[in-house]
Image (spheres, rainbow, N blue to C red):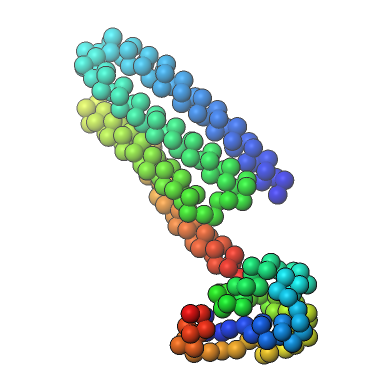
Amino acid sequence: MKNNRLILVVLQVLLGCALLLLAVFAAMSLPGSLQHLASESGEIARLRWPLLFVGEVATICLAMVVIATWILLRRVAHDEVFSQSSLRWVNVILYSLGAAWLIVTILLGVATIRDGEPGNAMAALLIVVPGAVLILLLVVMRSLLIQATDLRTDLEGVI
Amino acid sequence: MPIVMRLDVELAKRKMSVSELAGKVGITPANISVLKNGRAKAVRLSTLDALCEVLGCQPGDLLEWVDQDAFDRLNN
């Protein structure tokens, strides 16, 4: 039990760091990188603002995943995770991750097709396929949470 | 559920109140009411054991199967 608490604390700290990194990425890294790329390529310069918008949306989706995971960890710590409201936060994680994955997949797909380099295609697949695996794993975990919640509800009805 | 718990009869025999029974058995008065009103989905054997010990009776004295119509009449 003590080990679980330590792991929860470490996870929450790491999630806090991840949120901070995402904030820095959204505020500085992404706009800065696109500005630099736009100065070197006329094509990117034309697409700078749409790419920035899409990039920020994907970053916000990832931030929502981090925040929802934080909330679920707090519920685990307080033994409140087996409830319908926890399922809503799992749905937030799934839909946000799905949206971010879709955005990244489309961007990488378009870039890979225009680029035509096999190496870049492999790199894109190395991001897209594990992302899909992670999302499908979360769908399975969601089903497990539903079953565990139902069992917990039944058990609480036993006098 | 068509299995009812005849706690009223046993409580009346021993002139014991619901709260007194709850305290001795170690469950809340609310749960005793749930048992009495037939709203319990399941009962632990340990709870049944405690009830029989406190009331000095057998499980068969407490548990009775009734058909669904009789059960609905009991609860209405």
Residue A138 visible? The answer is no
Image coords of residue A111 (percent x, y):
26, 28
Quadrant in the picture for residue A3: top right
Residue depicted at x 44% and y 35%:
A64
Q: Which residue is drawn at 40% across and 50% down?
A: A136
Foreground pick, A133 / A51? A51
**Is residue B16 toward the left or the right of residue A17 in the image?**
right
Give the vertical position of B57 relative to A3 (above or below). below
Residue drawn at (60%, 89%) of the image: B64
A151 left or right, relative to A132: right
Up/down of B61 relative to A99, above or below? below
Q: Where is residue A156 in the image (x, y as percent from the top left)?
A: 59, 65
**Residue B58: quarter of image:** bottom right
Rendering coords of residue B16 (x, y %): 76, 79
Measuring from the top left, give residue A54's x and y in whole percent: 30, 27
Residue A76 makes an appearance in the image? yes
Given residues A101 and B2, the one toward you in this image is: B2
